[in-house]
Image: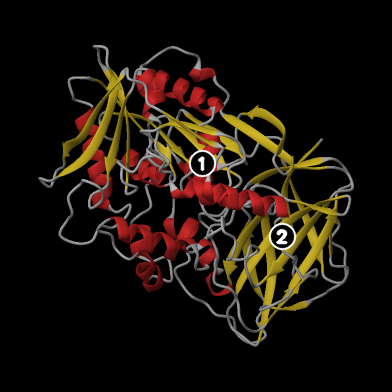
Amino acid sequence: MYVEKKNSPKQIFGKLRGLINPSNVMVNQISPSIKILRDVHIPTRDGSYLSANIYMPLQAGTFPALLSLHPARKDVLCKDGQMHIQFRFARQPGTINFSDETSFEAPDPDFWASHGYVVINIDKRGFGLSPKGIEPQKFFDQDEIENLYDAVEWAGVQSWSNGNVGLLGVSYLAINQYKVAAMQPTHLKAICPWEGVSDLYKDWFYPGGVREDGFTPFFSERIQQFGDAMDLRHEQSDHETRDDWWKSFVADFEEIKVPMLNCISFASQMMHTRGSDRAYKRAGSVQKWLYTHRGGEWTAYYSTEVNALMLKFFDRFLKETDNGMDEHPKVRLEIREFGDAVKEVRYEDQFPPKNVVWTPIYLDGQKKAMSLSGDGAESAPSFDLAKDSLQYAYIFEHNAEIVGPMKLTLYVELEGCDDANLFVGIQKFHNGEEVTFDGTYGFPNDIVTKTAQRVALRTANEDLSTPFSPEHDFDTLKPLQKGEVAKMELQLEPSATYFRKGDELRLVVQGRYFISGVKVNQPFTYKRSTEGYCKIHSSEQYRSELLMPVIEK
């Protein structure tokens, strides 16, 4: 049975202290050399407007603009002792620095205006000072996308504008960039979606077809307190499969043509990780770059290194500066071996790197192990979906990196039920002790990687899938018949982890999520299986296997 690693007394104390005073968040007063225009009305095509705060250099001239639109209320700032609540609950390994005019997950106007940019921070319709619509506001729908499109085109023709506009921001402020960019506004010249899901169903509300039950109700309830918003939790429950409603929020990625700087966080699994990977790979941009990491979401975004990279990127495409960005390596790859420690940062031409060797290791149910040969006898061990798990160990014979998404093929039979939610995770053990890593929202005791899959939504889309990456439509429920053995293909979230010779990689399959829902800084949880048994078949006929992207070292 999988045992969740508990927080140490030091970690618990650190959380409690952070709730009172997040000492690693440094808020500075914005420079007096920056001009601030508040509640500027940006006209929209339907005759209404959006409220924006605009920050610009005091000196005369024309400047490029950076836009972000969100429901976090642009005027909710870290001033007069106030602090964004997320910084109190979410552990961030490292110091975060920004000015007191920085909205949650938005660009710091002090940094960008000081470097010759106009920063436009916009209240989404129905939030802050932007007017309400006739009906409660949806999120990421066509109206929101058209509003942001109109704001881009407005910014591109102002007297202070050089005609070039970019989009920048984290999470929500990244998600709505994809569809706007796919619409190709005239003045949009570059985007930087820093950690953002790209398919609401697959990445957030139903990863693997399994309903998310923690962050979604929290976000839905909280967002309704601050604006005129639809009930996201109600919509989630009403749309159990990936129907046309969910598909309407997904961008036509191939129509994104502007240069793009993207970020994949290996920590934001079951949320941003796979969505960012999908957007990067499918975007039609000829010029695109990728930054990967496994640190704190905001620690990375506001860091000196990332600010310098984003500045170089936008200077090239919004200021049209010949600064070497065209020759900058395409992928910044960060490898972790132990927890917070970065083993190596290097640069690659693609992700996963060209030199990965896709290596299958086969499940042996008798030995509870995995092997390269796959010559074990036929087996079909069973586990109680409500409380147990199956675990398979693999010991590395050479030093190796696992870089990219892993694919797991399982042959599954159910007893006592016709459907189940399966959760699959990868743990690392060194000298017999589990090694943990940063997770979503700063959770410190996460496993290497994980995924989930609902058995009744197992059908893979053969046209979209590749040998290394299964894709599913999640649109048709197919419960298992009694005695039926079904093939399931699951993709574990991308990661980059170093294993030494003798280290153990442990595969865990169970009917519940790996992190309990009572963690103060881990709101995500998922609908668990409550009844029945699951058999995992392994044999010459049923080749259950884990396909790993391996780089031997």
Disc 2 crowd rating (10 Å Cα; few below 14, some 14-19, many 20+) is few
Residue at the far left: name it: 47
Residue shown at 67%/78% (left/top)? 385
Residue shown at 33%/22% (left/top)? 117
> Eyeballing the image, is 515 above or below 175?
below
Circle 1 residue = 281
- Residue 251 as seen in the image, left or right of residue 385: left
Disc 1 crowd rating (10 Å Cα; few below 14, some 14-19, many 20+) is some
- Residue 491 as seen in the image, left or right of residue 196: right
Q: Position of residue 213 (x, y in %)?
A: 49, 68
Residue shown at 21%/41% (left/top)? 51
Circle 2 residue = 6
Q: Position of residue 370 (x, y in %)?
A: 83, 60
Sequence-wise, the earlier of marks 2 and 1 is 2
Residue shown at 31%/61% (left/top)? 224
Q: Position of residue 184 (x, y in %)?
A: 29, 36
Instruction: Find out whether the residues at labels 2 and 1 contact each other: C-beta distance under 8 Å.
Output: no
Q: Quadrant of residue 180?
A: top left
Mark 2 is on which residue type?
A: Lys
- Residue 450 as seen in the image, left or right of residue 97: right
Mark 1 is on which residue type?
A: Lys
Give whichever of 195, 114 is nearer the camera: 114
Q: Quadrant of the C terminus?
A: top right
Q: Position of residue 318 (x, y in %)?
A: 35, 21
Q: Quadrant of residue 304?
A: top right
